[in-house]
Image: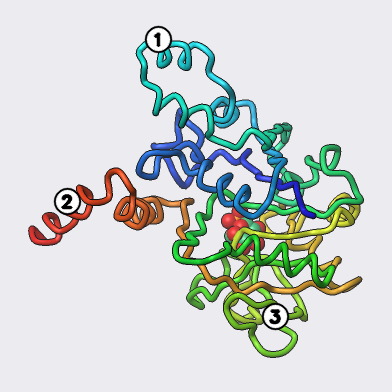
Amino acid sequence: MIRKAVLPVAGLGTRCLPASKAIPKEMITIVDRPVIQYVVDEAVAAGIRDIVLVTHTSKSAIENHFDKHFELEATLEAKGKQELLEELRHIVPDDVNIISIRQPEPLGLGHAVLCARPVIGDDEPFAVLLPDVLVDDDGLAQNDLAGMIAAFEATGRSQLMVEEVPWERVDKYGIVAPEGDIPAAGESAPLAGVVEKPAREAAPSNLAVIGRYVLPGRIFALLAETPPGAGDEIQLTDAIESLRSAEGVDAWRMRGQTFDCGHQLGYLEATLAYGRRHPGFGAGFRELLARYARTE
Ligand code: G1P
């Protein structure tokens, strides 16, 4: 069973300024909760019970969001605001642990994941979720991460979530080369290679790695030996390429829809998607959307 997930949240979020000047970009609100809560919910829905945040001194608001707030709870209790109190008490289920560890220097995503080594250990597989990307699983019986975990458990092979991106954006992503046919949505297939942020002319496909990974503990030893790569950072993609040449890695073609919350239009689109179907605000929000569409 895969029970642990690493969420690298140490990045300073310069793409989200000015919103992320005094709060972590992961704490920006989509409808009624911060981005990070959607990502933690996704992990929990896939069976994860230990969430390892790899974080930075300036981002303690993330840990606070998942911690008990005794004074606030006491105030709500005294005021008889039972419903709100229950919601705050169950931001994560009781059997979920939020663990945090610091990334002391911004040396890249690979280095951030390596910082979680003392918590995960070298013998246990784990998931990685990058909180820049929201994965909407609306209408699916099982989210993509749960599908990737099931595929890992059935085959023992690492899984990278991929989707097609426009060719002019391949230099923003890890890009995979499928070994044979491109897998259908909700299926995985072996890779012939994965490369971080290739130039368009050098990209082996337009299938991009979209911030969800299921990896073995062996990746830590590979990360520890990985030199700086693209952008002079220690890249997770480079360690995964070493893993692939040693034992094979699969690409999981996602079924859900993604929102790139690393930039403003992504936040706005996520707000539209989640706001429209919110159980409390959805009806009012749909009216607003109709009204604003008419005034175009
Ligand atoms: C990271 C990864 C990259 C991946 C991307 C989107 O890049 O290094 O391989 O495709 O996330 O999930 P970043 O967006 O941090 O530059």
Note whether 12 is above or below 76 in the view shown.
below
Residue carrying label 2: 288
Residue carrying label 1: 78
Question: Whole-percent x and y of residue 90?
Answer: 53, 33
**For marks 1 and 3 on the same chain, the one whose residue lies earlier in the sequence:** 1
Q: For marks 3 and 2, give the CA distance.
A: 44 Å
- Depth check: 92 or 167 in front? 92
Q: Amino acid at mark 2?
A: Leu
Q: For marks 1 and 3, give the CA distance.
A: 59 Å
- Depth check: 131 or 150 in front? 150
**For marks 1 and 2 on the same chain, the one whose residue lies earlier in the sequence:** 1
Q: Using the rendered view, name the quadrant where residue 243 is placed.
A: bottom right
Q: Amino acid at mark 1?
A: Ala
Q: At 36% from the left edge and 16% from the top edge, which residue is drawn?
A: 80
How many residues crowd mark 3 within 10 Å: few (<14), some (14–19), many (20+)?
Answer: some
Q: At 73% from the left edge and 32% from the top edge, which residue is drawn?
A: 101
Look at the numbered discs 1 and 2 and tell me whether their residues touch, using CB distance below 8 Å.
Answer: no
Q: For marks 1 and 2, give the CA distance.
A: 35 Å
Question: Whole-percent x and y of residue 244?
Answer: 83, 71
Q: Secondary structure at mark 1?
A: helix
Q: Secondary structure at mark 3?
A: strand
Residue carrying label 3: 177
